[in-house]
Image (spheres, rainbow, N blue to C red):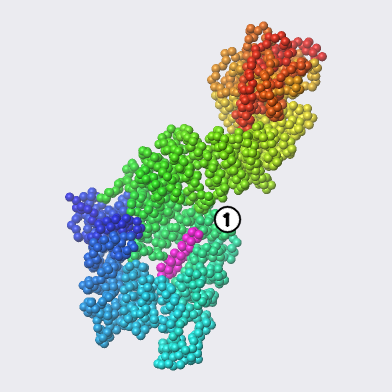
Amino acid sequence: MPAIEKCVIYDWKRLWQMVSGIHYETPQDTVREELLNVCSELQAGVLQFKPKSASDIQLAVLLKEKKQEKLLPFTERLQELLNLESAQCWEILCYYLTKEYRGSASLLTQLISTETNMSKLLEDIRHYYSLERMIVLKIVKNVLVFYNVPNHPYHHEYQAVVEKLTLPRLLDSYLDQLDSLINELPPRKLLAGECYHCPDRLTSWSERNARETNEVLHILMLIVEHLPMDQVHIKRLFATIKQHSFGRIQNYLDESNIYHQELIKNLTYSELVLLLKCLDFERPKENAQLIDELHVQVASMHHRPEHGPLLLVWMLLRLRATNDSEDASSLLRCRQLGKRAVDLKCFVQLHGIVTHPMFADDSLLSRIVRKTIYNQLGYLCDLFDGDASCARYEGIYELLCELLSWPQLAKDFCSCEDGGVRSLYNTLLENFPLQFSNLAKLAQALTKAGQGNYVKSQLESLPMLALLYDERQHKLNELGSDEYELLDSVKPFPRIDYTLPAGTSCTAVQHPTGFYMHFRCHVNFFDALHHEINCLLLEKAQLHGDFESNERIMRVDAGLKYLVLAVQKTKSIDGISAEMVHPTEMCIDLLSKFKSVQCPPVGLLSSCLNVCTALLPLVDEEIFTRVSNLDILPTISNGSLKDFKLYASAVYFESRFLGSVIDNVEKKQQRYEFLLAYLNFLRTYTKLKRKRYLQVELPGLIFLLRDVFPHLHTWHFNSQSEKNRIYFEVLSFICDIFDMLGGHVGDTNNKCEESQLLLNVCVYSLLNLDNGLILLRFVGVGNAFVQYTMELETNWMQQQPHGLMMLVRLSMRILMQLLCLKSQVYSADTLSPLEALIYTQPKQRDTLRIIPTVCSYMSNIFDRWLPIVSCRLLKRIALEFNMSLLACLDMEADQIRLTFMQKLPDELESDSVKIAILELVEACIAKQPGVTEAFFKVNYGHDHRRSFFAFGKECAPSIGDSIVTYMREFLDALEAQPLTIQQLLPSKIMNIFHSLWKHNLQMLVDELLKLPQFWTKLCSPLFSEPSNQPQVRVYTQLMNIVSIEAYSTGNNQNAELRDVLKQFFARDCFNQWLNYVFDMPKVPAVANCGGEELPDWICCLQSFKDLIVILLKKQPNFIAISEAQFKLLAKKCLTVLVDRAHYLEDMRPFIMLAELYIFLLLRFKHAYTSNGDEEQELMEQLLQLMSRICSCYEDLHVRAKEASLAIITKCAHLYTGLLIRDSSIALRFLNSVVSIICTELQSMEKSVNLAETSDKVSTNSLILCLNLLKAVASIFHNDGPGNWDLPFVSVRLFQRLLRCISYTLPLHGKRVLTQQLLDVLIVFAKSNCSVEFLHCDVGEHLWLKLLPPRELLQGRLEFNPKNGSDVWTMEQWWSIYARGIELVNIIYDKHKKCFLQEALQFVGIHEVYLVDSLLLGKQSLEPAAMQLIRAAICLVASLTEHHKEWAQDHATSLFNIMNAVQGLMCHATSMFHQQRNLKCLLAGRRSQLEILRSVESITIDDEIINACNDLTDIIIYCVKALQKFTPDLLDLLCSSFYEPHKWQPILDVKFGAPKLNEGNLTLTFGMVLNMVSVYVKALNMQNHGFNEAPLNVLPNVENGDVTSGSISANSTRGERSFTKSLSANSISSAAPCPSSELLSNLDGQLCLVALEHLLMLVASQSIYVMRSQELEPRWKQIVRRDISSELLSFHEFVRRKVIVDYRDSRCQWVRRKHGLFRPKQLDDNPKGATTGQSTQVVRRSTNELRVNVVRRLHLQQQQQQQLQPGDSQFEMTRMLSPIAGPSNAQHLEASTPQGALEMGETPRAHLEHRKRLHANQQAAEELLEADENLSLVEVQYFPPTTDTGYCELSQVQLVEEDYLQLMSALFSVIPQSEPARESSSSV
C-alpha cells in the first residue's frame, strides 16, 4: 500500500496565475472551483507545510515506492534544508522539476552529480519553496482585499471563499501563524553549521521568515478591517508584538545590511500599524477594561521611536475612553504620555509610515493605514487644538499633507467644515501668509487628490491677512481688547494692485517673530505669491549663495509647486485668472536671475521650469520663445549638417546651463530635480508635435544619450526611486520618438528630413556600445531577478510606476524598435555593436546572455505584458538574426517546447500570450530552421538518447507537444465552423500554415497532409460567405497556399485539391468570390511605411490574381476552368479595370487588374464575346481605358504602362475585324495609340537631349509600344481605311523613330530597344507608309550609326579585350546589323531608283562590314550570323540590278563585294559536304572544340537540316546576284547579236569537289554542277511532286494592260521523320553527295528553286565559255564532257519525274501544252479588284528571276490574240524562281492546280519559323483572300490538245515540268555542239 494516497501540496504558483486576477481571463467558475478546493490550505497558510518531525513516513520508503531510489541522497539533503516532512518534500521536488526547472535532462544529471552543482540546485529549490509559501499568503491577502469590491471580476468567487472560511477562523489561524513564525527556529543542520554555505542559508531562512511574518501581519490587518478584534485577541497580539519588540529582535539579520534594515523596518511599521488599527475604537469606552489592563505595559514603552505613535494613540484612547481629562493627576499622566510621544517625534514617525513604499500605494492595506492615522490625528485636534497649539508640533503639517494627497481622505477633509484636522487648516488661514509654505503644500496635496477646484476657490478668497505691525503704515483705531480698525487704506504688497480699504478690522497677535495685525479681509493667494517672488528678486543680492535654507526661496518654491498643479488642471488659457498671470510670467524672470549665480537653487529653478511646462499646452509658442532665449536648455549651433553621425558624436552641441547645473550642483546634492523638470519639459513639448526637431528634440536627445543615459548608473542618489524615474523618463522619451517618427521613414519633405535625422541619431546612438550596453543591462536583468524584486514587494497586484519591471519592458520595446530600424543607419550586412553584444558567439563568451534572458521572461507570473513583449522581441531577433537562434538560446528542443508550446493548449492562458507565441513560430519558420524544428518536433519521435526522471507525475520522455498538435485542433475547429477563421487566434495559426507553404516547408506538417480531407478542412472558409471585417487576411493566405500547392503539384496528383478547386470554381461560389475580390474602395490604399500591413482587399486581389494565373498555366491537365466562368471573370475584370482607371492615385489595384486581364486575354485565341453587341461594348470599354491611360500616361507606374499596352495589343489582334469594319472606332483607337507612342518617344527624346546613358531605366513600355505599332500596321495596311497612316504621318512618327534609333544604336544597354525600333521601321517600310522614308533622311540618321560600335572595333586591336555584361560582343551586334541591312533592302525594293543613291551610299560606307558579313559564314553559322549573311546577300542581290550605277559610284565596293559573294557561294556549297565543320559553325565558338574532339559520327538533326535550308536560300541569292554579271540565257539563245566583250567568266573551269586545304576557293563549274546533283538527289529521294499551275502569264494586248495570272502554288513542307524510306528509283550523282538522311529532309520546294537558279547560271556560263575565243578548245571539250556526265542524274530525274509517259511517246521533246481558254467573269465590276490588285503590285517585289522563254518571240501574234480579262484575284507570288513571267497576267487553269500559297521575300518564306509576327499575319490574310477569290472561279481541266493549230512558236503557259524539260533538252544540246559551228556563230 503506498505511503501517500494523493498529492499533499498544490501547485501554488500556477494557482496564483489563475485566481489572482492579473490577467482577468480565467473563467469565474474555474476560479471558484480552484479556490474552494484549497480552502483548508488557505486557512492553514504556512502551517500546512509540516516540519520533518510531523510525519513518520520515511523518505527511503517513499522513494522506493516511486522507484526513484537513485534520488535518495539528493532528496535527503533537500529535506534537511527545507525541514519538510517526506511526502511534502517529494512533492516540492516534483513540482520544481516539472514546472519550474528550465534546464535539459542531461544538465539535471550533471547538477546532482557533484556537490557544488548540487548546492546550486538545492538553493534554487529552496527559493521555489519559499515562493510557494509566500504565494499561499498572497492568495489569502488578495481574497481579503477584493472580496468586498463589487467591481472586481472575481468578487463573488472571493466572497464565497470568505464565507466558507469565515473571518473568525481566519483570524485565529493567522494569529497562530504569527506566533509560529515569530517563534520558529531554523533547521537543525543550519543551527549546527553542518551544511555548506551555512551562514548564507541561515540568512536566507531569516529573510524568508521576516517576509512571511510581515505578510501575516498584513493579512491580520485586513481581517481586522472587516472584523475588529476582541480584547482577548488584542492582548494576545500585543503580547506577541511586545515579545518580538516590534520586529527588532532578529537574531540572524544584520542591521548594518540595508536590506535587513528594510526588513526590520517593515516588521516594525506593520506591527505598529496593526496595533494602532486594533486600538482605533469608534466607541472606546466599551473597551475600558482592556485599556486599564494594558496601561502599565504601554506606558512603560518610551524608549524607541516606534513607541511614539503608540504612546500618542494610547493617550488619546485614555482621554476618550476614561475620565482622565477630569482628573488633574490622570490628565497630567496623559500629558506626560503625549510629551513622550512628541519627544519621540511621533508625527515624523507617522509620516515615515504613510510614505513608506509598503503603504505608499492605493491598495486597501494602505488606505487602512492612512485612515487609521488620519482618525488619530482628528482625535488629537478635537482634544488639543482649541488654541491652535497642534500646529507647532514638528512634522504634523507634513503628515497632514501626505494624508490629504489621497482622494478619499481629501474628500472627507473638504466635506467636513468643522472638527477634526480642519482646525489645522483653519490655523493656516488665520495666520496667512505667515505659514505660506504649509498652506501651499496643503493646497498642492488637495489638488493632487482631485480637490483642485475647491482649494483654488478657497485660496483666491482667503479670509485673513497677517501683517507685521508698522506704525508708519498702519493707522489704527482701537476698538477693544486687541481689536483695531484701519483708518487709512494700505497697500500690503508693493507694486501689486491690492489694497486694504480703510475701516478694515484687525486683531493684534503676538508671534515669536514679532507683533502681527491680522486683518479681516479677502486676499488672493496668488497676489501673495507674486509678492513673495518680488521680494525674492529684490533680496537676491543679499542671499550670498545660501539658497537651500533660505525661507523666502522655500516659500516661493512651495507656491510655484502648487501653481504647477493649478495650471495643469486648467483646460484653456481662460482658466488662468489675472492674479495667476504675474507669478507664471515671473518664472522666466526667476530662471533668468538665478541661472547665473554660482550655486543656483535647483529646486526653485525646477519649479519655474515645471510652470513653463504646464503652460506649454496652452501657449506653447510664447513659452518656447521665452525659454529658448534664456539659453538654459541644450542647443545645436549648426543645424545645416546632414550627417547623423556628426550629430550623434555631439558636433556643434552645447549642453548650456542644464549640463553645468547637473555637474556642479545636482550631483553633489544627489538630487536631480532640474533634470527631471527638463525631461518633463522635453516630453511635453515632443507630444505637442510642433516639429522643431533641431531646436528641441534633437538637442535633448543628444544630451540624454551622451551625458545622461550612459553615465546615470555611476551617479549617486538619495533615493533609488528618483534614479528609476530618470531612467523611466529617458526610456519613455526614446519610445515617444519611435512612436512619433518610426512610421514616417519614407517621407521626403523638409520637415521629414529633420525627423529622419532625429530618428537616425537616436537609432545610431542606441546601437553603439555606450548606450546599447546600458539598454542591454536592463533587458538582461533576467526573470529571476525581476521576479525576486517583485516577490519582495508588498503589493503584487500593483507595480511601481517607475519600478524595475517597467524599465525592463520599456528597454525590450526599444530594442525591438532598434532591430527594426537598424537598416536606417547600417547596411544589411553590417553588424552594429549592439547586435554584436546580443549575438556573441561562442556562448562561453556571452556574459550578458541576452537571448536566453529574454526567453526567461516567458515564465513571469507578475506582469501579464512581460511574456508578450518577450515573445515579440524574440520574433524580431529571429527575423533580424543571421545566425542560429537555437545556438544563442542554448536550449534543447524539449526546453523550447516546454517554454512556449505548453502555453498554447492551456485554456487558462492569455490569448495575447498565445498570439505572441504563434507570431514567434511564424517568424522562426521564415529565418530560423533550428528553432522551427524544435517547435515542430522534427526528428524526435525515435530519439532514444534521452533519459529523463519520471517523478511520479504525468510526463513523457519526449517533453512537450509540438505546434502540429495545435494545428490539428485548428483544422478540426475549422471543419466544424469555418467562420472560426475570422477570430484573431485562429488567424495566427493560418499565418503559420501560410508561412510553411511560402517557405516550402510543408514537410513539417506532413502528418497533417496525410490526414483525410486535409484540403477540404483547410479550404472550408473559401466556401462560406467571405467576411466584411477589415484586415481579414486569412482568405488571402488560403489563396496563396492553394496557389503554391497547385504550382508545385503534378498534373495527376492531389485529387483532393482538384476537387476543392472545382468546388471553388462552381458558379455560385465563384460569383461570390468575384464580387468579394472586385469590391474595392474608391479611395487610395495608404500603407504603413513598414509595408507589413497592407489593406486586405489589395492582398486578396493579388492572391486571387496569382491563383488564377497559376491555374491558367496548369490547365487543362490539372484543372479546367469552365468557359462560362472564364468569360465571366474576363468581363468583370475589364469592367472593374476601366472603373479603377479613374482612381489612379493608388496604382496597385490597377496594376493587378491589368496584369490579371492580360493573362486572361492570352488564353483566348479568338474574341470571347458571343455577339456583336458584346463586342461593341467591350471595344467601348477598351477605348475608355485607352483614353484614361492617355490622359495620365506619364504618371503611370511602369507596370501599369506595360500591362495596359499588352492589353491594347492583344485586343487589337482579337478584334481586328471590328477595327476594320468600324472606321470611327478605328480612328479613336489609332488616335490613342498615337498619343501613347508620342508620349513614349517624348520621354526617349528627353533622355537623348539630356545625354542620359543609364541602362537601368526600363524601356519595356517603349518596346511594348513598338509592338503595338507593328500590330496596328499589320492590321490596317491591307484592309484598313486608306488614310489609316495619317495620324502617324501628322506627328512625324517616322522621323522621331529614326532619331531615337540613331541615339540607341551605339548603346549596349539599349540593344533590345534598338532591335524593336528596327523591326517597327521594317514593318512600316513594307507598308504603304514606306514613301515617308524618302523624306526622313534615313541615311543621315542611320548610315553612320549602323557602323559597328567602337568597342568592337577596338577589341580587335586589344590583346586583352574587356569582358563584362555591359560590353558589346559580335554576336549581339549581328542581329542589329542584319535588321539595319534588311531595312535598307526593303526601302530600296519598294522605291528602286528613288532610293538608289542612298542605298549605294550605305554600301560605300559599309563596304568593309558588308564584306565581313558575307564572309561571316566561315566563322559562324549561328542563327544571328545566318540572319546577317542572308540580309547582306539579299541586299547585294537587289542592288546588282543597278550594277552599272553602282560601278560608276563605287566600283571598288562592287568588285570587293562580288568577290565576297563568290566566296560565300563557295563556302555555302562546301558546307553540304563538311557536316562536322557545319556542326561546329552552328554550335558557336564555345562548343566547337568538343565537337572537333568527338570521334562519333555527326547526327543529322533539325539544326543541321534548317542550316542546310538556310544555305540553300543563300545560294539562291548568290546566284541571283551573279546572274547580273553573266550573259542572259534568253539573249544567248534567241538574240542574233552576241557581245562577248561585255562579260567576264564567273565559273572557273574546274570539276570535282573542292579540297579542304585550298586557301582561296574559286567558284567552279564542278561546284555548281555538284550542287545541281545534290538538289536533284534531294528531290528524287523526296519523290517531289510538281504543282502544275502555270508559271508564266499571257499579256492582254487588247486592253493595253495585263491582268493577274496564276503563279505556281507551292505545297508547304511538313515534318519529316529521319527514318523515312528512300525511293528505290532514286538516282545519285557520281560526285560526292551529303548523306541521304539529310537530303531526304531538306525543303523540296526550296531545292527546286535552287536547282532552277543553278541550271540557269550553268547554262549561261557554259554557253559563254564555249563561245569564248580566249579559252582553249580542250577546256571547252572538258566543259562539254563534264556537263554531259555530271548532269546525267538531272536528265534521269527529268525523264522519270517530268516525262511520265516518255516510253509511250515517240519523241521525248513532245510536251504538254495548256490551252488559251479563260474562265468566265463572275464579277461585273472588276474596278475594285483592279484597285486592290494595284496595291499588291506596289508591294510585290519586281526583282524576280523567272523569265518567259518565249516573251520576245512573235510579238505580233501576241497582240492579235483577243483574250477576255479574268476576274480572279488569286495571287501567287514567286519572287526568286528564274522562270516567272510579268507580275500581272491572266489566270489560266492548270492541269493539276494546287491550293497552297507561298508568301514572303524568299522562296521558302512560308516555311520560315523565324519570321516576325506581321509577316505571318499578312500571309494569313492573303491566304484567306485568295481562297475566297478562288472559290468564285469554276475550275475546268483540259487535256493536252491535239489541234495542229499550235506550233513550236505558239504562245503557251509553262509549268515546272516544262521548264525542267527545256533545261534538260538544252543541256543535252550543249555537249553536242561542234567547235566549227561555235566559231561560225561567234563570227
**Residue matched to label 1:** 748
Residue appearing at x 62%, y 37% in the figure: 1267
Q: Amino acid at mark 1?
A: Thr
Q: Which residues are magenta?
A: 711-740
Instruction: Give above or below for 1210 relative to 1740.
Output: below
Residue 1172 or 1597: which is nearer the viewer? 1172
Residue 719 among those drawn in magenta: yes
Q: Residue furthest front?
A: 1724
Q: How would you classify the magenta stretch by its main secondary structure?
A: helix
Instruction: Give above or below for 299 relative to 1747.
Output: below
Please tell me whether mark 1 sits on a helix, a strand or a loop. Answer: loop
Packing grade of label 1 (10 A; few <14, some 14-19, many >=20) is few
The reply to whether residue 1740 is visible in this rendering is no
Residue appearing at x 77%, y 11% in the figure: 1875
Residue 1272 among those drawn in magenta: no
The reply to whether residue 150 is visible in this rendering is yes
Query: In the rendered view, does 1087 fall on the left or right side of 1538?
Result: left
Query: Where is the C terminus found, in terms of image quarters?
Result: top right
Residue 951 location (% of width, % of height): 27, 50
Residue 1624 or 1077: which is nearer the viewer? 1077
Residue 46 location (% of width, % of height): 25, 62
Query: In the rendered view, does 884 fall on the left or right side of 1353?
Result: left
Residue 754 or 1676: which is nearer the viewer? 754
Residue appearing at x 39%, y 65% in the figure: 800
Q: Residue furthest right?
A: 1883
